């Protein structure tokens, strides 16, 4: 049986005996037949029309989009908004800016701007496009404090805006419950220290995939949102993507309402029911979520939910940008003599951004092997208690042989955004 496993922007073929394949699972969605129509319908729906928003939108107006590590088709949304947006801009005194919500990630590369905004928008509005920098104090402003003590510092572009347009897509998130919605602004446009304080809550109970109610990270983000957008007019476009990362569902209007609508769709689309945990699980981080080890962690966390104790989790992620800007995950694991020691050290030290990833990976390594097919250096992979392989075929063949007679492999082709769940 041939399986085309995603690798970068293409695929790599793997041959496996049919009886050894437990399944090949991606998101529960087909290719959207009319992405533009889906978006247009959302933007013109009564009570949530984009034109209605612009008639009352005060200046300055800020448009917030995701960075290049996300699959959100912001360019398609902006193409739909552009005629009305540029008509609004013609009114004397109206000011417009675009900001890339990088969170604590690096600034967008010049070659990424065309993909994020579309070539025409990137060229026409080049002087209005900014990347958020979470560590540049000159770009930040204090707006309040949450009940959990998080000091909320945000981009001055957001603090000074009277109107805001938020474009995002919603998928499961391994400790915030779901991406999308409030995450465009927090942590998307927050200060490093604000993100640190919020993400520290991921070490607490309730910070899990698919969970919103009772999730301390999500609830803290909701409070940040309340103080961060108080008095502002916010228009939200929340998407759920199809198998090709095109628009499969769109909701437009109020930020909270559109986020909840998208979550309901995402829950049906990204939760994958499986019969049992399997001996071998191939978890793929699809492009562009395969950019580095830090982002690949999402695929590791999801894949681990499907692997049995003593099994093998094969992570497939090209990682063209290496370990990522935040190397805490790598540093915490590579400095320890064992996963158990890493967990002990993590629990005894002050929290750092990314440490929750190291702790969760160490916990997985306590019960299963993690093998890595990537472009990372073999020595780096081994230093974090994982086994490097040159290609997927070799890794799958070796794992099935090692797991013995009756072993089966489950392929999760979009592990970064899907969540396997054992029936019952």
Image: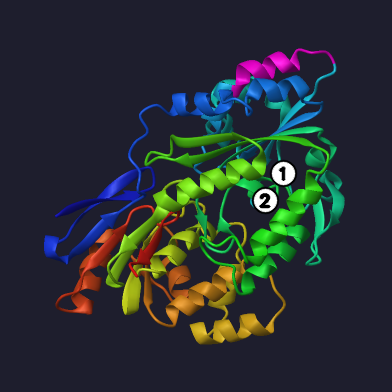
Give coordinates of residue 237: x percent, y percent. Answer: 59, 35
* Magenta span dominant secondary structure: helix
Extreme-front residue of the structure: 46
> How is colour applied across the structure in the image?
rainbow
Range covered by the magenta-colored residues: 81-92
Q: Which class describes the residues within 10 Å of circle 2: few (<14), some (14-19), or many (20+)?
A: many
Q: Which residue does the numbered mark 1 point to in the structure image?
A: 132
Residue shown at 63% from the left, 80% from the top:
346
Q: Is residue 82 magenta?
A: yes
Residue 279 sits in which quadrant?
bottom left
Q: Is residue 49 left or right of residue 162?
A: left
Q: Is residue 74 left or right of residue 218?
A: left
Q: Is 204 in front, or is 95?
A: 204
In the rendered image, the quadrant that contains the N terminus is bottom left
Residue 270 seen? yes
Residue shown at 84% from the left, 50% from the top:
137
Marks 1/2 in contact by CB < 8 Å: the verdict is yes
Q: Is residue 54 left or right of residue 78?
A: right
Q: Earlier in the sequence, mark 1 or mark 2?
A: 2
Q: Which residue does the numbered mark 2 point to in the structure image?
A: 103
Residue shown at 16% from the left, 66% from the top:
20
Q: Is residue 97 magenta?
A: no
Give coordinates of residue 246: x percent, y percent. Answer: 43, 35
Residue 191 seen? no
Residue shown at 33% from the left, 51% from the top:
26
Q: Which mark is residue 51?
A: none
Q: Which class describes the residues within 10 Å of circle 1: few (<14), some (14-19), or many (20+)?
A: many
């Amino acid at each position: 049986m041939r399986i085309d496993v995603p690798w970068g922007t293409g695929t790599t073929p793997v041959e496996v005996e049919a009886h050894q394949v437990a399944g090949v699972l991606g998101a529960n969605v087909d290719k959207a037949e009319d992405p533009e129509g889906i978006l247009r319908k959302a933007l013109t729906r009564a009570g949530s029309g984009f034109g209605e928003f612009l008639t009352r939108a005060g200046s300055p107006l800020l448009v917030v989009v995701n960075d290049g590590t996300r699959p959100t088709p912001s360019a398609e949304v902006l193409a739909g908004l552009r005629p009305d947006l540029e008509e609004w801009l013609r009114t004397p005194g109206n000011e417009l800016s675009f900001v890339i919500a990088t969170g604590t990630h690096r600034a967008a590369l010049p070659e990424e701007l065309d993909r994020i905004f579309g070539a025409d928008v990137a060229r026409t509005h080049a002087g209005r496009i900014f990347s958020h920098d979470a560590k540049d104090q000159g770009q930040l402003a204090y707006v309040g404090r949450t009940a959990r003590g998080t000091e909320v510092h945000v981009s001055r572009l957001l603090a000074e805006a009277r109107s805001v347009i938020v474009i995002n897509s919603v998928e499961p998130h391994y400790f915030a419950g779901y991406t999308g919605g409030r995450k465009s602004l927090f942590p998307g446009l927050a200060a490093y220290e604000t993100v640190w304080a919020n993400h520290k809550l991921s070490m607490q109970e309730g910070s899990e995939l698919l969970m919103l109610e009772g999730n301390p990270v999500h609830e803290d983000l909701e409070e940040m949102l309340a103080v961060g957008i108080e008095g502002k007019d916010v228009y939200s476009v929340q998407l759920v993507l199809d198998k090709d990362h095109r628009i499969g569902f769109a909701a437009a209007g109020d930020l909270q309402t559109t986020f909840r609508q998208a979550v309901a769709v995402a829950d049906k689309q990204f939760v994958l029911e499986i019969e049992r945990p399997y001996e071998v699980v191939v978890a793929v981080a699809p492009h562009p979520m395969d950019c580095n080890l830090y982002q690949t962690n999402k695929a590791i966390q999801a894949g681990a939910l499907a692997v049995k104790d003593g099994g093998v989790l094969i992570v497939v992620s090209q990682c063209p940008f290496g370990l990522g800007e935040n190397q805490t995950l790598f540093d915490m694991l590579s400095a320890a003599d064992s996963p158990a020691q890493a967990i002990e050290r993590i629990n005894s030290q002050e929290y750092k951004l990314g440490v929750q990833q190291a702790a969760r990976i160490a916990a997985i390594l306590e019960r299963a092997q993690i093998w890595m097919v990537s472009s990372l250096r073999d020595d780096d992979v081994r230093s974090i208690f994982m086994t490097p392989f040159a290609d997927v075929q070799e890794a799958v063949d070796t794992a099935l042989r090692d797991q013995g007679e009756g072993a089966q492999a489950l392929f999760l082709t979009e592990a970064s955004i899907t969540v396997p769940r054992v029936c019952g």
